[in-house]
Amino acid sequence: MEEQHVPANLEVDADEGKATYFVVYDAGLPVATARILPEGTGYHVQRVAVEKAYRKHGLGKMVLNAIIAYAREQNVAFLKLGAQLQAIGFYKTLGFQLTDQPEFLDAGIRHREMQLQLT
């Protein structure tokens, strides 16, 4: 939140209780996370974050692969997310593809919608 200057009231929302969280810990401290929310026949991936000191060590990929595996176990049709423009390449390496939706702003940050078809 602080690094990207996102206000806390935009990060903590009414969906907190409906979400499933995936967290990587190091020495008891959370260092990488993401959450999913049910959306139709799939899940919406949100709040993907890795602590700055832990980046480039595969933790983001670990979290997303855990989400993909979980989604497959749950037999959901797709995963979708709003990717910050600089993260599109990362998500493409995991099989996500850009949708036809136009670029949008979320908390003042430019995003594109991406989707991974699972069925």
Image (cartoon, helix red, strand yellow):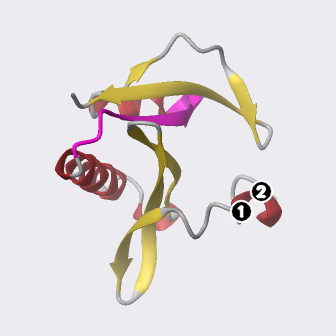
Residue 34: where, in percent of width, then height? 46, 58
Residue at numbered disc 2? 10
Q: Toward which corner of the image does residue 84 lie, by quadrant?
A: top right
| Total labels drawn | 2
> Quick check: marks 1 and 2 in contact, CB under 8 Å?
yes
Residue 59 horizontal side relative to residue 36, left or right:
left
Residue, x 46% and y 37% (percent of image)?
Answer: 40
- Asked if 75 appears above or below 25 in the picture, the reply is above
What's the distance in space between the residues labelled 1 and 2, CA to CA?
Answer: 7 Å
Residue, x 41% and y 57% (percent of image)?
Answer: 55
Residue 60 horizontal side relative to residue 51, left or right:
left
Badge 1 element: loop
Residue 64 horizontal side relative to residue 73, left or right:
right
Residue, x 32% and y 59% (percent of image)?
Answer: 59
The kind of residue on which mark 1 rests is Asp
- Asked if 85 appears above or below 2 in the picture, the reply is above
Residue 77: where, in percent of width, then height? 30, 33
Q: Of 109 and 106, which appears nearest the observer?
A: 106
Magenta segment boundaries in residue numbering: 75-86
Q: Toward which corner of the image does residue 15 lie, by quadrant?
A: bottom right
Badge 2 element: helix
The kind of residue on which mark 2 rests is Leu
Q: Name the image quarter holding the N terminus.
A: bottom right
Residue at numbered disc 1? 13
